Structures are given as C-alpha cells and as structure tokens.
Amino acid sequence: MHMQEGRIIIVIGVSGVGKTTVAKKLAKTLQLELIEGDDYHPDSNIAKMKNGDPLNDTDRGPWLEALNLKMQTLKDN
C-alpha cells in the first residue's frame, strides 16, 4: 500500500477494544500502509508485558522513538 497525500492515521486505545481491526479496515479502505505499533517494542518491554508488569514512561521512550522514525520514513517516501 502507499502513503496517500502524506497521510498518517494513528489508532490508539486501551487493550482489547478493536484497534487492530479498525486500523486494518482503515488501511485497506484508504490504501495506506498498516504499521502495528506493538512490533516496535524492544525486547525488554515485551518481557515486562508478558509478566503482566505495566510499562512506565522510561520503557515507552525507545518504543516511541522507533515509531517516530518509522513514521518519518513513511512521510519522506
């Protein structure tokens, strides 16, 4: 899929509300690339979440930086 007019749509919400389902339908309908945010978590975050430990702001920093980099890459293409 391709970027449409430099558009980036971010779907956010709490766990289990259907974000991925909505995002997939949006991406297909609008012909946008779907990026799954969970794929950008470092291994340390994944380990914490598997243990049921909540992430803190320090944990989220590298994840948000990775997502930002990906969005910049999409925007520049």
Image: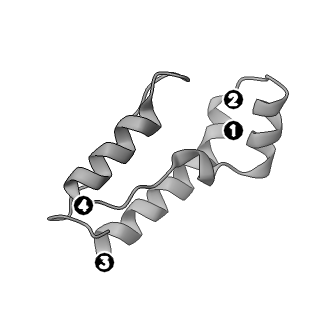
Q: Residue 68, image x and y in percent? A: 45, 56
22 lies above or below 66: above
Query: Tag 1: residue type?
Result: Asp
Give the residue drawn at x 79%, y 23%. Answer: 53
Mark 1 or 4: the one toward you: 4
What scheme was used to colour the molecule? one colour
Query: Tag 4: residue type?
Result: Gln
Q: CA distance from mark 1 to mark 2?
A: 6 Å
Residue tagged 2: 55
Mark 4 or 2: the one toward you: 4
Residue tagged 3: 77
Q: CA distance from mark 4 to mark 3?
A: 15 Å
Tag 2 or tag 4, which sits nearer the N-term?
A: 4
Q: Name the residue nearer the viewer: 49 or 34.
A: 34
Residue tagged 4: 31
Query: Tag 3: residue type?
Result: Asn
Give the residue drawn at x 44%, y 28%. Answer: 18
Disc 1 residue crowd, few under 14, some 14–19, many 20+, Cα 10 Å: some
Tag 1 or tag 3, which sits nearer the N-term?
A: 1
Task: Judge whether residue 11 can be spotted in this image.
Answer: no
Mark 3 or 2: the one toward you: 3
Tags 1 and 2 touching, CB below 8 Å = yes
Asked whether, in this view, residue 35 is left or right of residue 77, the answer is right
Asked whether, in this view, residue 63 is left or right of residue 14, the answer is right
Give residue 59's mark: 1
Identify the element where label 4 is drawn: loop
Identify the image quadrant of the C terminus.
bottom left
Q: CA distance from mark 3 to mark 2?
A: 32 Å
